[in-house]
Amino acid sequence: MEIEISNINSCSIFRHNKVGSIKKTDIKMCVSNIFNKNCSDMLGWLDLPDIDSEQIEDILQFAKSIKKRFKNFVVLGIGGSALGVKMLKYAFFDSINKKEKIKTFVLDNIDGDYFVSLLNSLDLKKTAFNIITKSGTTCETITQMSIVLNLLKKKKISVQKNLFVTTSKGNSLYDYANNLGLKTFIIPQDVGGRFSVLSPVGLVPASIMGIDIVQLLNGAKNIRENAKSSSSNLAYISAHICSVALNNGLTNIVFMPYSQRLKLVSEYFAQLWAESLGKRYNRQGREVFTGQTPIKALGVTDQHSQLQLYSEGRNDKLFVFLKVKSSSFDITASDNIPFMLEIKNISLSKLLNNEFDSTRLSLAKLDRPSFAVFLDSVDEFNMGELIFYLQTMTAFMGEMLNINAYDQNGVEQSKLYTKASLGFEGLEKQKNELEKFRKNQKFLQF
Amino acid sequence: MEIEISNINSCSIFRHNKVGSIKKTDIKMCVSNIFNKNCSDMLGWLDLPDIDSEQIEDILQFAKSIKKRFKNFVVLGIGGSALGVKMLKYAFFDSINKKEKIKTFVLDNIDGDYFVSLLNSLDLKKTAFNIITKSGTTCETITQMSIVLNLLKKKKISVQKNLFVTTSKGNSLYDYANNLGLKTFIIPQDVGGRFSVLSPVGLVPASIMGIDIVQLLNGAKNIRENAKSSSSNLAYISAHICSVALNNGLTNIVFMPYSQRLKLVSEYFAQLWAESLGKRYNRQGREVFTGQTPIKALGVTDQHSQLQLYSEGRNDKLFVFLKVKSSSFDITASDNIPFMLEIKNISLSKLLNNEFDSTRLSLAKLDRPSFAVFLDSVDEFNMGELIFYLQTMTAFMGEMLNINAYDQNGVEQSKLYTKASLGFEGLEKQKNELEKFRKNQKFLQF
């Protein structure tokens, strides 16, 4: 992995904040805060690549038995319990038209049109379900579980054979699963959902799909070494760029892979960045309403949809590009098109690269800064590097913003209203507010 | 269709701009500018719902013959030539696990891993290709066409039978297609790509997939009547809200359907809004760098990914929600979960609705304004309404911002660099700049 930063130092807001001028002492302090776990008790994700061989063996054996016994595999989870798996599934299978070892579905929404129509189409006897929720009380996931349990029972299918659970030790779901005799995988207490893809949350489904999880972890280990160093620390430098950008009014960050296979990395990054950094209070309790809004894009596709705004709209965006150096498939435009002879003999990879450079250069000319992350290829090792790079970059940015990057108090209010609507006790105030809101809705019809 | 606006007037930035206070004279002037086509010569999209019955018959007959002769159908197009079709395909097929009349692919990227691996998997003899580009010179699409032409020839497959073209009359591609004897469909000159889904660009693929295009157009006609009126004009009121929001610092607009089937409406809207409104100059030539950045989200999924930022990050976002009143599939959580008894007997549609209301209310409590668009259901008529509503809302917003919503000069620079890299003539300056950029790249490795 490497990053390309020529379009950073050339832009005006970096004139007094050149990347080369980062102080080694600053890096060292930030690295030490993170890696010595001084700044939070939720830094267990740093150790995930060191998972012991026994656990790996357990996952591999389990995955093997699932692949042998089932035709379909359904993940029931949402947010951090879904996005990593979706990203890996898309990168290794969907986008290159390759089939997973068993047909895999990640159902991270509760819309009946989607959830029910899919369940209806599956032979449930031949379908394994993985419930994933760290707290064990995620409303959407437990509701999905209740539905699936009932469907399995109705069809006299063994819950113990077809359903397993990934959660944290000792919570109600964990106890429930154990009482039922379900297989369980453990999410460490000190690993938050959005940092959990290299825990059993991601590793078990990845292994079932046919992804080499050992290589994934090796990649993560490799970039972890880099993230500890005080020179050419790619994650730190990237976070530094983002924080200077934010301090100078670039309140949005466009994340734009120039690779179809990496399309969903944007979704994964968007959660990491939004949920970790979008915070009302800093560590001293001062109201800051900080964070940088992630915007998902895809090259070259969105050149024909978003680039106009990126070029001529408000100059409030930092651009992060992602590029893969070598693709597995390529082809050359070998047929003469008489009215466009120039494209003859151009390969798709060359055209993609030309457009990538053209977009970056044209944005730089408009004083709109960008940097680019290059992967050698889309394989497990490189994906492991990319995942850990994005996680550490987020952690460093959290330090620079002086906020707690590991909580998510902002969603509590909405959750309370939902719980109130479901009749949870002690929420009369919220229930009344919600009822009042519903009564006072103002509909405009025609 | 209706819109719900109680969370607009209750928020502080609308205190002096209440929705109820819109002047009828303002609406009338704006409506007249658009519908009398005073403000642009690119307003042909307003007439698309009036397509004559002969043309409809031609499309239906052609679609029938394609469905009869082929197993696969591939659209080659990008931006406005792809997003509408992708949105319809997802809404009517992919998201509810229903099969199109023939297996359909929209290839709107040039990444070889994606493009080549897909083509390799298809029986080309049984595959129809639709080239869609209004200008006829879209680099990506013509390159794809060159590749496909060559593959067909190599396999001795008749180009005339397997390939047809949608473009505007009289351009080089149109002449080329006619010389080759290819079937062509015409995009009117005064309809821009992002406003073209109700032209043959969208109608032909929709019809081939099995979508009722007459109902789609009926829905569009219905909302067009509303968009001409000076009371309860939903598109105008929506644009008014967006423009007040933008003028008061809400520079981002989050578009968040609470419906899996409507997920890709966000992509469609994002192009309309970004490319139409992201403009450097206003109509008097003054530099304004205006526009509002669209952010794609999905309920309830992104509550577990983006809502934290939406609640606690910068207050710079207006929220547009989309909700469907009735879903086709529903199910009740009927199995007892002992540690969460409250979810028993809740249906998915009820839970979705509760979460939808909870999110809107919690944002309003934080003084973050939102409005919601309600569709009766996801059928062709309602999709037609939604499409035309979003188009007219964009047009009205363009008038309010006093910009030309129908050009896209901001992407020219990037296109010139790409053309220079391909050896197009007369672009030596750009070629040199690009070479210099490439030479001066600064890679950080580890």
Image (cartoon, coloured by chain):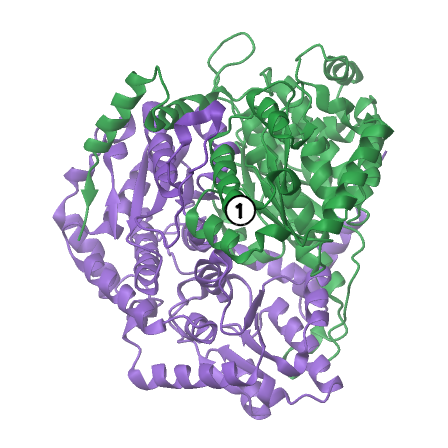
Chain colours: A green, B purple
In the image, what residue occupies the spot 46% across and 81% down? Answer: B63
Q: Position of residue B134 (x, y in %)?
A: 49, 72
Q: Quadrant of the N terminus of chain A?
A: top right
In the image, residue A375 sits, relative to residue A287, either above or below, namely below
Which image quarter: residue A336? bottom right
In the image, what residue occupies the spot 51% across and 64% down? Answer: B82
Q: Tell me which chain the residue with mark 1 is part of.
A: A
Q: Amino acid at mark 1?
A: Tyr
**Left or right: A345 in relation to A135:** right
**Left or right: B439 in relation to A427:** right
**Left or right: A325 in relation to B234:** right
Q: Which residue is mark 1?
A: A310
Q: Position of residue B104 (x, y in %)?
A: 55, 69
Which image quarter: residue A253? top right
In the image, residue B151 sits, relative to residue A425, either above or below, namely below
In the image, residue A346 sits, relative to residue B270, either above or below, namely below
Relative to the observer, which residue lies in front, A333 or B26?
A333
Relative to the observer, which residue lies in front, B310 or A426?
A426
Q: Residue furthest top?
A: A284
Q: How many marks?
A: 1
Q: Position of residue A347 (x, y in %)?
A: 76, 67
Q: Position of residue B189 (x, y in %)?
A: 40, 75
Residue B144 appears anywhere in the view: yes
Which image quarter: residue A49? top right
**Left or right: B194 in relation to A12:** left
Residue A367 appears anywhere in the view: no
Disc 1 packing (10 Å; few <14; some 14–19; many ≥20): many
Q: Residue furthest front?
A: A156
Secondary structure of residue under mark 1: helix
